[in-house]
Amino acid sequence: MRSVDELTSAGITDSELRKSYLECKRLNSLHGKTYFLATLLLPKAKRPFVHSLYGFARYADEIVDAMDPQRSPASRREELEQWSWKMLQDIKRGESEDLIGMALVDTVKRFDISISYFEAFLHSMAMDLEVNEYSNYEALMEYVYGSAAVIGLQMLPILGFEQSHEQESKNAAQNLGIAFQLANFIRDIGEDLDRGRIYLPLDELKSFGVDREKLERRVLTEEISHAIKFQISRVRDLQSKAAIGIQYLEESSQPCIEAASELYCGIVDEVENIDYQVFAKRAKTSTLRRLKVALPAWARAIAAR
């Protein structure tokens, strides 16, 4: 019997809308390989909507982090402001002509996702054009709430959860999103310095005898290693807290999120494996580890369907 494609399974039949969802999927497969792998563990009918959220987030991120030397920060800010305003207006009126926006608006309407989550996300993207360091964890959380926590909250209606455990599910979604983001910050310390940014809270770095000048030397010291270890412990604590809430998701969604948690938070394991040499190497999840996580998760996903 012929297999039904993802878009048809999701009830997406309009030709222009299908093009939009396919573009979002392309962005996901191209830029979010681990995320894309985890998405494949979802039932076909859920995948396109997750792709639409990724496509939206990735497009905004590309505007902010484009490294084209011909583009000034001011031009990126103007483009982001214009695109952000257009996306929010499209969400409010329930339709869009933007290639990414069509799928996003359709997803928002289908699952009644709060526009406040997208406002918070775009606010954080704008912060990346203006803020290059954070004095403490509280200040960082303003950024991380919009850049990561709301991603989990956006996903929740698509994944499905027990209504009687709504708050626990929301807490888990936020904690896991924050853990993913902090793991990326740890891995990308060197790359972020290339963009003039430090995402690790300055007061916490200072407590280990580390400041911006020492980081910019890009020489791993004992002090920097201890500072990184502290941040890794926070990622694992958040991951542990989030695990409690995964049990309240729809059974068919649990293998995807469990695999994503293992692979994304596992970035910090890879940082340990390279002895915290974040200035000299990029910590990567090996293909073998991905398979070790994905294959059992795939078996659980099939059983859950």
Image (spheres, rainbow, N blue to C red):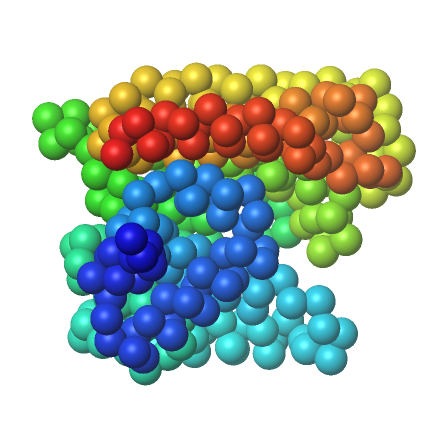
Instruction: Establish if 266 lies above or below 147.
Output: above
Residue located 29% across and 53% down the image: 1
110 relative to 69 in the view: left or right: left
Residue 135 percent location from the top left of the image: 59, 38
Residue sitting at the far left: 164
Residue located 50% across and 63% down the image: 26
Quadrant assignment, res 114: bottom left
190 relative to 94 in the view: left or right: right
Residue located 18% across and 75% down the image: 93
Instruction: Establish if 74 lies above or below 116.
Output: below
Residue located 40% across and 56% down the image: 51
Residue 224 percent location from the top left of the image: 78, 25
Quadrant assignment, res 9: bottom left
Front-most of 165 and 210?
A: 165
Instruction: Establish if 157 lies above or below 78.
Output: above
Q: Quadrant of the C terminus?
A: top left
Residue 12 percent location from the top left of the image: 24, 66
Residue 181 percent location from the top left of the image: 53, 39
Query: Would residue 273 be visible to someone looking at this image?
Result: yes
**Circle count:** 0
Front-most of 238 and 107?
A: 107
268 relative to 215 in the view: left or right: left
